[in-house]
Structures are given as C-alpha cells and as structure tokens.
Amino acid sequence: MSKKIKVLIVDDSAVVRKTLEEILLSDPDIEVIGTASDPYIAVKKIADEVPDVITLDVEMPKMDGITFLKKIMTQHPIPVVMCSSLTEKGAETTFRALEYGAVEIIQKPKLGVKQFIEESKIRICDAVKSAAHARVKKSTAPMTVAPKLSADVMIAKPQGKAMIQTTEKVVMVGASTGGTEALRVFLEALPLDSPGMVIVQHMPEHFTAAFAKRLDGLCRVTVKEAEDGDTVIRGRVLIAPGNKHTLLKRSGARYFVEVKDGPLVSRHRPSVDVLFRSAARYAGKNVVGVIMTGMGDDGAKGMAEMKEAGAINIAQDEDTCVVFGMPNEAIKKGGVDHVLPLERIAHEVIRLCS
C-alpha cells in the first residue's frame, strides 16, 4: 500500500475548507491532516505534523497568502498549491505566488453545478498530486489515476502522408506544473521575429488572460490569450484559454487557431494532446514541438503523432523540470528528437525554424 499524500488546507472560509476537504478525501491517495483559517494556526499545525502539500488561499486576514508563502519557502520549503478566486486581482497575485515558489494554481470550487464539481475534483486532486512530486520527492513514479479520454473526442488522428514542408514554421508548446516560470524563461529569450507559436499551459480559466498579459509585458514577442480564429503569425504567441481546448488549423498558407468547448482530454482542458494532434494533422513537417515540465502524460501521444507527421520535437530535461512527468512520457513514447535544459530551448527552436 502506497503512502498517502498528507495535505494541510489553509483558507479563511469555513465553506471552502470543508469543500476542499471533501474533494481531497474522495481520492484514496490523499489524506487531509488538518485545516487552518489563517497562517498563524497553520504554523502551529505544521509544528505538530509537517504536510507533504499545503493548499493556500491568496487573500486572508491577519497575514495574506503571499507573505505566508515567502515565510514557508525561506524557513521550511513545502510544496504549495495556491487556491484563488476568478478575479483579475486574484490572478495577478497568484502569479506572484508562483514566482515565489508555489507550484500549482487551483480555482476555488463552486457549488451547485454537478459537472463543475466533478471536474473540480479531478483538477484539484491532480494539482495536489503534482505538487507532492515537485522537487521535494525523489520518486517520480506515475500514480494510479482514473480512466481518461484521449484526443479522439476532439479531433481525428492524422490520415495519410504528412503535409509537405513550406518555408513558414510554427511552434507548438505544452507545459503544466512549473510551466508558468519555465515559459517565462523560454519566451523572454525569443527574438522579436520568432515563428508563430501556440502554447497550452494547464491553468484555470481567466488566469490565462492575466498570464498572457504578464508575459506580454516581459517579452519582445507579443503574447495574448488565444481567441477563436486568431492567426498564428511571426512575432506572436497565443496562450490557450483556460477551460477551452485550442486547436491549430490551416486555410491555404494561413495558420489559425480554433478555440472550442469539449470534455477533459488526458484529464485536462485545454489539453496538450489536442493541440499537438491538430498540429500533426494540419502542419506536419512545418512544426517544431516543445514539451516542458509537468505531471502526468498529457502531450506524449500528440508529440509522437507530430513526429510521425514530420515535426521536430524538443523536451525539457529532468534537471531543469519542476516535475519530469510530461517530458519523460513523451520521450518514452518516442516522440522527442532533442532533450535540452530550459535555458537552451529557445535557441534550438530558433535554429530549427531558420
């Protein structure tokens, strides 16, 4: 019997604490060892028993989540999952938390919508499991998960020969746990005239718009949250919106994205597998694929399909990953051509697209 992941819930709302506790206890691999209404109570509980993961509210009385996070990371680093409401202020604060060492974001669960609650259970439990594997765990063995849907539910597999190569390349990127900071490092290194790019970063809805805005202010390339019909052009990076699947499409010489609803694929929406399969089908040899840090295997099948269609693919190496799950699975599937440290990926992407 495997050891359960011990979780401490820190949130000033009794309703949220109770809801999160019920969600986490529904997973046989997770144990809630306590709850706390503020950081001061949390410190006392940590002194009694150190959790594997802390879920931490962003906005709390007495001491805010960001201040508490800084103290945790400087005194006794523990993987932290930030729990935030869907507000612009909350999103911006959460990204500061990721810079300070938090490893995942979850959206505060809502009540009353059955589908939302069911999907929240999957996302929240997966976020906690990802955090438990982030850096502090020596073992990266995959955990047992519930059955999941493949990209078949969103787009058919590529048929026949891959598209002929043209002069215009496009870059497809997938990331999850630890990806927000990895993507910042990657995108800041890109020149102004970089090839058009589409990125899936596992993240709740509304956070992706704030994430894109933050990156746009840091990078030479233009970064925006993808909208249905947006053209993929040089110098622009499109971030798949949270809670929507994003697919690459082509009309003549024009690449564009389709943003649409659909079920969770590989336990995610947006799914890297969906983006990668669409790139294999509509861009073939014109694609350079990149898979970065993240828990699980989303993107592994799609990357293998891109390679079969003629794409050249890069995986982030284990030493620079927060969690070496997604890149490792893509390597094992045979879809990766180059394994590189994070700081070398941008240079290699530009070289391959030249």
Image (spheres, grey):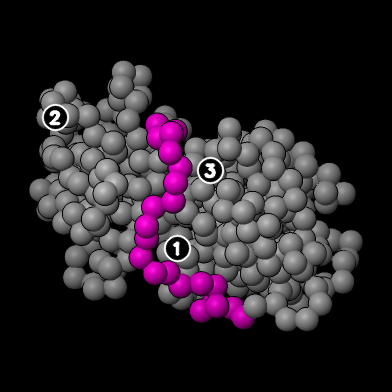
Return the mark for residue 268: 1
Return the mark for residue 45: 2
Quarter holding residue 147: bottom left
Q: Amino acid at mark 2?
A: Lys
> Which residue shows up at 77% across the image and 55% down it?
312
Could you tell me which secondary element the residue under label 3 belongs to? loop
Dots 2 and 3: beta carbons under 8 Å? no
Q: In this rendering, would 156 be left or right of 110?
A: right
Q: Callout 3: 10 Å neighbours few (<14), some, many (20+)?
A: many
Say whether residue 144 is magenta.
yes
> Which residue shows up at 87% across the image and 66% down it?
165
Return the mark for residue 324: 3
Q: Amino acid at mark 1?
A: His
Q: Main secondary structure of the magenta part?
A: loop
Return the mark for residue 249: none
Q: Earlier in the sequence, mark 2 or mark 3?
A: 2
- Toward the viewer: 323 or 289? 323
State the extent of the magenta-drawn residues as a range: 135-156
Dots 1 and 2: beta carbons under 8 Å? no
- Toward the viewer: 258 or 92? 258
